[in-house]
Image: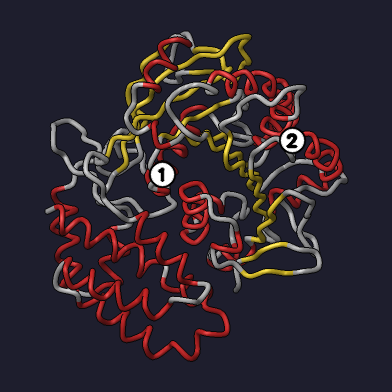
């Protein structure tokens, strides 16, 4: 079974990112097209894990010396189903299968489809242990765990979130449709479900995290954006942990967003209010056995991140990768604050998109450009690797706000996973480059 899981994980990682491999080949792609097509066919028909290993050797030999070589190697490494990294739910030994089983089955042919179906049929929902800290007030009653009211102190805990392995699609947070009034929203085999929450003191939180064997591999602190309730933030953080295949622990910092479309102005004030609290939280993670702490903020959460870092003293010397994703931050404010953190020891990346309609409306509302929006060319500055992610939005007819691409698009999830997993700069992740101004982009 372990070999079958490993074979399926490799097929999912490679075939699911086959277009990205060809994009990264650039001018070399036409010359290698026939050989690549042959290898893709061999992968789809591979009878067992040993055959896949031989095909991988041939693929790496073919790509050696091209921009796609490092990308494929990292895909292979990230797809490894390491012993002890499966998470059990309900009974010991339950297997957490690789993500996107249905997609892999459709792509690799009937034989592997039967294998995928057999594995999925046995797969229990995967439980993600999600550590969190929040400056929301604890709810006194009702279904919500935390309210939208700011608290003067942090609440800590450990949430258990389940992923419906055999139904999960990469980048999706499966939820009951609004019209399905008869469906059970807590059905763990169909939906991403936030289950039990264990409240912890500050000391117990750090102690439990320090004793977690996966935390040794690093921490990824996720900060959500505007119009997000705690429950939604927890489910999104768990989906990221599952889909990124991050080898450490994802930790959620949830600030008191109102969770309402009409609460934009209130959320702006609460994000600013939360910056110092977030900074203190990062200081509490300065110790521990983990070698690095990575930060990923989305939308208005980037205000919490930026102002939290730009204090008088650097909050954590273990900070590695700092990702500003779809940043709803005034460009001139970023220019003012970023130099205060630029040389402090971390690596900074900004993902922006021309199709981000939410930031387009924010720019209109404030009459000011946003860091995560592109109107002509992306915002760039020294010490920040800017990535134009416009091309990753593959939604039908461009419907939607195009604001959550960081978590629901395969190519971007892969790029973020490689960035926080291996620390490779954009030049080594196979992205295309523009010189004037200097930024990176996903080719169309």
- Relative placement, left or right, of 226 versus 106 is right
Q: Secondary structure at mark 2?
A: loop
Could you tell me which quadrant the C terminus lies in? bottom right
Q: Is residue 409 visible?
A: yes
Q: Quadrant of residue 341?
A: top right
Give the number of the disc on residue 246.
Answer: 1
Question: Of 8 and 392, which appears nearest the observer?
Answer: 8
Image quadrant for the N terminus? bottom left
- Specify which label sits upstream in the sequence, 2 or 1: 1
Q: Badge 2: how crowded within 10 Å, few (<14), some, or many (20+)?
A: some
Q: Badge 1, how many Cα within 10 Å: few under 14, some, many 20+?
A: many
Residue at 50 percent of width and 30 percent of height? 252
Image: 261 above or below 26:
above
Q: Name the colouring of the figure.
A: secondary structure
Q: Which mark is residue 205?
A: none
| Disc number for residue 341 | 2
Q: Position of residue 21 (x, y in %)?
A: 46, 72
User: Percent position (x, y) of residue 422?
Assistant: 47, 51
């Amino acid at each position: 079974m372990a070999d079958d899981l490993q074979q399926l994980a490799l097929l999912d990682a490679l075939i699911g990112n086959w277009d990205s491999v060809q994009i990264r080949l650039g001018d070399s792609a036409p010359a290698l097209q026939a050989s690549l097509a042959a290898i893709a066919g061999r992968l789809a028909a591979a009878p067992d894990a040993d055959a896949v290993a031989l095909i991988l050797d041939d693929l790496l030999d073919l790509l050696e010396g091209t921009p796609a070589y490092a990308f494929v190697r990292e895909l292979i490494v990230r797809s490894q189903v390491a012993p002890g990294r499966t998470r059990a739910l309900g009974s010991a030994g339950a297997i957490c299968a690789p993500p996107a089983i249905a997609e892999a089955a459709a792509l690799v042919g009937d034989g592997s489809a039967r294998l995928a179906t057999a594995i999925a049929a046995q797969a229990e929902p995967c439980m993600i242990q999600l550590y969190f800290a929040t400056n929301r007030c604890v709810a006194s009653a009702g279904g919500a765990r935390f309210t939208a009211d700011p608290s003067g102190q942090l609440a800590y805990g450990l949430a258990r979130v389940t992923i419906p392995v055999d139904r999960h699609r990469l980048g999706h947070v499966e939820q009951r449709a609004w019209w399905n009034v008869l469906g059970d929203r807590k059905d763990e085999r169909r939906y991403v479900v936030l289950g039990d929450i264990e409240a912890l003191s500050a000391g117990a939180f750090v102690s439990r995290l320090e004793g977690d064997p996966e935390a040794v591999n690093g921490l990824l602190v996720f900060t959500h954006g505007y119009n997000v309730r705690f429950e939604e933030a927890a489910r999104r953080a768990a989906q990221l942990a599952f889909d990124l295949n991050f080898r450490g622990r994802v930790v959620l910092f949830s600030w008191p967003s109102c969770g309402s479309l009409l609460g934009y102005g209130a959320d702006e004030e609460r994000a600013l209010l939360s910056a110092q609290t977030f900074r203190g939280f990062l200081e509490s993670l300065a110790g521990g056995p983990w070698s690095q702490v990575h930060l990923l903020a989305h939308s208005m959460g980037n205000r919490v991140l930026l102002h939290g870092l730009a204090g008088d003293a650097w909050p954590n010397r273990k900070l590695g990768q700092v990702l500003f994703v779809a940043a709803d931050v005034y460009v001139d404010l970023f220019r003012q604050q970023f130099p205060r953190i630029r040389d402090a020891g971390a690596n900074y990346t900004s993902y922006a998109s021309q199709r981000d309609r939410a930031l387009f409306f924010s720019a209109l509302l404030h009459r000011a450009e946003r860091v995560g929006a592109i109107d002509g060319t992306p915002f760039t500055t020294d010490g920040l690797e800017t990535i134009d992610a416009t091309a990753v939005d593959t939604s039908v007819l461009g419907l939607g706000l195009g604001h959550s691409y960081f978590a629901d698009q395969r190519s971007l999830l892969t790029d973020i996973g490689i960035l926080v997993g291996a620390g490779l700069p954009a030049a080594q992740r196979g992205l295309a480059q523009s010189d004037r101004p200097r930024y990176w982009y996903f080719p169309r």
